Image (cartoon, rainbow, N blue to C red):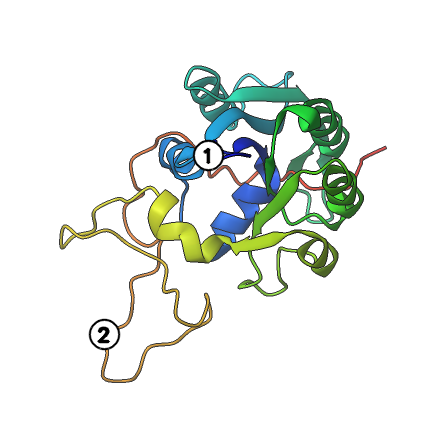
């Protein structure tokens, strides 16, 4: 690249990233996330993909989608599909794999580095295709959950794998607790790490009064967006 800054594009699989962060116990500050990945590079595009239920009077994803659309992200959305699970709970799904693949291949000749924020194993072939075009691919997800959110096949295919928990201090939205300090994930041994007996127990991330709402904070129990299509 002759000393020039690398040209990057960020592809965020919204539902997959949301699930990973939720399982790790923190919320994402998307302004900080964008800053983190554009540092030292030319961030050509920052895509965010999500399915939105258009027939709902209020969609829990809509506030985040609107904020991203006005703050430097390229929002890609489509109508979500609604269904009722075995427990009788209303759920919402939407698969954005095709949209991500089409946009990535369309921009491949203009970037040096693709950052894919998803652990979906279906993206292995896309990563391979991007690499064939000379694009370096970094996958951002986590293996610190049980089961791991990042599929083994894309971890092996990617040029680099970043665990979401390792970069959490740089991209998390910090809310002060009663002592005026922010909650942070424990990065030493993953989410199942337990403190020694003499150490005061860590307060669960969602215990007590709910934190202030903001971009990325859409903890609605009806929202569940995964990679399975619904007929």
Q: Is residue 151 above or below residue 70?
A: below
Q: Which residue is mark 1?
A: 218
- Confirm whether residue 223 shows in the render: no
Q: Secondary structure at mark 2?
A: loop
Q: Mark 2 packing: few (<14 Cα in 10 Å), some, or many (20+)?
A: few
Is residue 150 visible to us here?
A: yes
Figure check: 107 above or below 221: above
Q: Nearer the viewer, residue 67 or 211?
A: 67
**Residue 152, horizontal then vertical, whole percent:** 71, 60
**Residue 145 occupies which quadrant of the picture?**
bottom right
Residue 148: percent from the left, percent from the top?
62, 61
Quick one: quadrant of the C terminus? Answer: top right
Residue at the extreme right of the image, as rendered: 231
Is residue 47 left or right of 214 when viewed as pictured? right
Judge from the rendering whether residue 77 lies leftward or rightward of residue 215; answer left or right.
right
Quadrant of the image containing the N terminus: top right
Image spot of residue 108 (x, y percent):
69, 28
Residue 69: image tag = none
Q: Kindly indicate whether the residue at mark 2 contacts the one at mark 1 (C-beta within 8 angstroms).
A: no
The residues tagged by marks 1 and 2 sit, at their Cα atoms, a distance apart of 30 Å
Residue found farthest to the left: 179
Please tell me which residue is depicted at 47% across the width and 32% down the height of the picture.
5
Which of the 4 image quadrants contains residue 126?
top right
Identify which residue is drawn at 49% across, 22% down.
Answer: 73
Tell me the tag on residue 200. Answer: 2
Tell me the residue at 67%/57% (across/down): 155
Where 118 sits versus 108, above or below? below
The disc, 1 or 2, on the residue closer to the chain's N-terminal end is: 2
Drawn side of residue 92 relative to residue 8, left or right: right
Residue 173 coordinates in the image, percent (x, y):
33, 41
Q: Tell me what residue is drawn at x 47 percent, y 35 percent.
A: 3
């Amino acid at each position: 690249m002759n000393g020039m800054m690398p040209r990057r594009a960020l592809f965020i699989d919204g539902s997959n990233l949301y699930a990973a962060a939720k399982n790790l116990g923190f919320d994402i500050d998307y302004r900080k996330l964008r800053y983190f990945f554009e540092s030292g590079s030319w961030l050509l595009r920052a895509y965010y993909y999500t399915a939105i239920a258009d027939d709902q009077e209020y969609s829990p994803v809509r506030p985040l989608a609107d904020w991203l659309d006005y703050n430097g992200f390229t929002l890609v959305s489509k109508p979500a599909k609604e269904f009722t699970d075995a427990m009788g709970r209303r759920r919402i799904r939407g698969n954005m794999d095709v949209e991500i693949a089409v946009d990535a291949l369309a921009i491949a000749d203009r970037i040096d580095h693709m950052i894919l924020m998803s652990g979906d194993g279906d993206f292995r072939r896309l990563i391979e295709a991007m690499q064939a075009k000379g694009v370096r691919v970094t996958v951002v997800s986590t293996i610190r959950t049980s089961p791991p959110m990042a599929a083994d096949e894309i971890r092996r295919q990617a040029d680099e794998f970043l665990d979401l928990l390792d970069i959490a201090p740089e991209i998390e939205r910090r809310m002060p607790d009663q002592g005026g300090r922010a909650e942070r994930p424990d990065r030493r041994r993953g989410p199942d790490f337990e403190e020694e007996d003499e150490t005061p127990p860590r307060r669960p991330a969602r215990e007590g009064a709910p934190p202030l709402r903001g971009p990325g904070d859409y903890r609605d129990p009806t929202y569940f967006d995964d990679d399975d299509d619904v007929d």
